[in-house]
Image: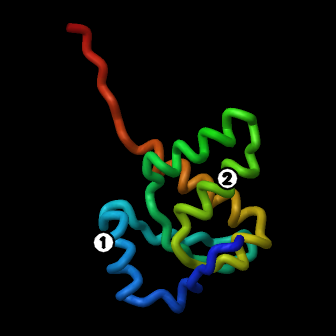
Amino acid sequence: MSQEYQKYTDITQDMNLQWEAKFGKKRISDLSIETSDGETVNFVIRKPDRQVLEAMGKHAAVKNVSATNKVLISNCVLGGDMEALEKDGEVYIEVLAQLNMLKQQAKATVKKR
């Protein structure tokens, strides 16, 4: 990943406040993952916005799963244990799963008129 990330243990309150101001407090979450070997890794993530979804869509349209996932992670993981994300497949899959859940939380109701 070319973007510079802050390790989870080095994330400050000021950084959290900046993210909340930029993306909205309700859109920021802490993610904790316990791996199969008992290690716990942590991340600060944000809910994908329309721009991220559109950028993902461009890659999804040509079935480039790797690029689609890279857009999601590079835009929505704000900081954390990035070495684990890069090297541990189960962490990578779980981060992607949680980010995908965030983008699918809205509920809609359609009623006939």
Task: Answer with left or right where residue 63 lies relative to residue 8.
Answer: right
Task: From the image, tell me which residue sits under label 2.
Answer: 69
- Disc 2 residue type? Asn
Of 66 and 2, the residue lying toward us: 2
Question: Is 94 placed above or below 17 here?
Answer: above
Q: Quick one: label 2, few (<14), some, or many (20+) residues within 10 Å?
A: some
Q: Which mark is residue 21?
A: 1
Task: Answer with left or right where residue 9 lies relative to residue 34.
Answer: left
Residue in view at x 35 percent, y 35 percent: 107
Q: CA distance from mark 1 to mark 2?
A: 25 Å
Which element type, helix, strand or loop, lies under badge 1?
helix
Instruction: Residue 94: name its quadrant.
Output: bottom right
- Disc 1 residue type? Ala
Mark 1 vs 2: CB contact within 8 A: no
Residue in view at x 54 percent, y 55 percent: 99
Colour mode? rainbow
Residue in view at x 52 percent, y 72 percent: 78
- Please identify the residue farthest to the left as the structure is shown: 113
Position in image of residue 111 (x %, y %): 26, 15
Which element type, helix, strand or loop, lies under badge 2?
helix
Question: Is 46 placed above or below 83 here?
Answer: above
Position in image of residue 105 (x %, y %): 41, 44
Task: Answer with left or right where residue 105 lies relative to residue 101.
Answer: left
- Please identify the residue farthest to the top as the structure is shown: 113
Q: Quick one: label 1, few (<14), some, or many (20+) residues within 10 Å?
A: few
Residue in view at x 46 percent, y 42 percent: 104
The quadrant in which the C terminus is found is: top left
Position in image of residue 56 (x %, y %): 60, 45
